[in-house]
Amino acid sequence: MELIFSMTNTNADKTSNYRCGYVALVGEPNVGKSTLLNALLGQKLSIVTPKPQTTRHKIAGILTGEDFQIVFLDTPGLIRPRYALQEVMMSFAGTAIEEADVVMILADAGERGAVGSLKHSAALAGLSELKDKKPVFMVINKIDLIKKADVLPLIKSFSELLPFREIIPVSAIKGENLDDLKKTIVKYLPEGNALYPEDYVSDRDERFFVSELIREEIFKVFKEEVPYATTVEIEEFRESDTERKTYIRAVVFVEKDSQKGIIIGKGGAALKQIGQSARRQIEELIGHEVFLELFVKVEKEWRDDKAKIKRLGYR
């Protein structure tokens, strides 16, 4: 998998009927926003785990076709924040909604009571006013988990929550209806030139995605509170001058000494497991051999300190 990254917006001249714009993916945690983004792009960009609130940043995924460019904005699951990091995460989601030309709110078809849950959720709050300013889609994800006969009644139930511009059932993991979703999105985008060169897939750089892949492994290995207390910072990212190899030094920050011990594990076994799994993912990302060093440090109560949150890369 080869990714090309940009840190700046670069206009590309296109014909007058070219369409381009931002599409925000929003919804409650674990409805499949990141899985859908990866499926639409045809490659892994956002990390995915079964745990809620895995996504912490606003991540742009760029899909370019012959006559369109869609800039998807993957966002953290919408919740009522309990501490400073979650407040920052919700600000990322809010910014994405403000920037977007189209807003897609996702729901999980397989979740019992999904309609009622969405009705009373933070995800739906404010969208009734937003619908008059920009198109709001309802995307019902994970339809592979329900019977086909149940899809139309589910669409009807969601339609009663809000006069959505479009309601589209999909299965991100199975690839169902994704082409129709893309075509529908393009119809609602404004005419204009591309924002990025056609070979770009994100506005984030490799260092960011390397840190995310390490964090993904932490979420896979550990349970309950430990992964939520961690964040990853890349201290060194250096390519060898003499061989096709990248040297990466990364620090896993935790909030407590006890969490540091858990992340390292007996005899360093847990940290070694994380490093080995992450290294394979990173090598697939950048296309050649990687030497990865992982360290664990304590940054007390970093999730509730906005200065520390900003310093650790949440901007």
Image: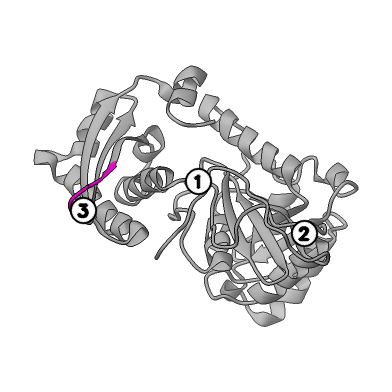
Secondary structure, mark 3, is: helix
Secondary structure, mark 2, is: strand
> Where does the magenta region start and end?
238-243
Using residue 280 as the reference point, say whether residue 107 is left or right of it: right
User: What is the x, y in percent for residue 295?
Assistant: 22, 34
Q: Residues within 10 Å of mark 2 (few under 14, many from 20)?
A: many
Q: Which is nearer the eye, 64 or 119? A: 64
- Above/below status of 106 relative to 228: below
Q: Residue at x 76, y 66 (%)?
A: 186
Write down the quadrant of residue 62 in the picture: bottom right
**On-image quarter of the N terminus:** bottom left
Q: Residue at x 52, y 48 (%)?
A: 6
In primary-sequence order, the first of circles 1 and 2 is 2
Amino acid type at image mark 2: Phe
In primary-sequence order, the first of circles 2 and 3 is 2
Q: Which residue is tagged 1?
A: 204
Using residue 261 as the reference point, say whether residue 44 is left or right of it: right
In primary-sequence order, the first of circles 3 and 1 is 1
Amino acid type at image mark 3: Gln
Q: Residues within 10 Å of mark 1 (few under 14, many from 20)?
A: some
User: Is residue 242 rendered magenta in the image?
Assistant: yes
Q: CA distance from mark 3 to mark 1?
A: 24 Å
Q: CA distance from mark 2 to mark 3?
A: 40 Å
Q: Which residue is tagged 2?
A: 137
Write down the quadrant of residue 135 in the picture: bottom right
Secondary structure, mark 1, is: loop
For this orientation, the residue located farthest to the bottom is 149
The kind of secondary structure the magenta stretch mainly shows is: loop
Query: Which mark is on residue 276?
Result: 3
**On-image quarter of the C terminus:** top right
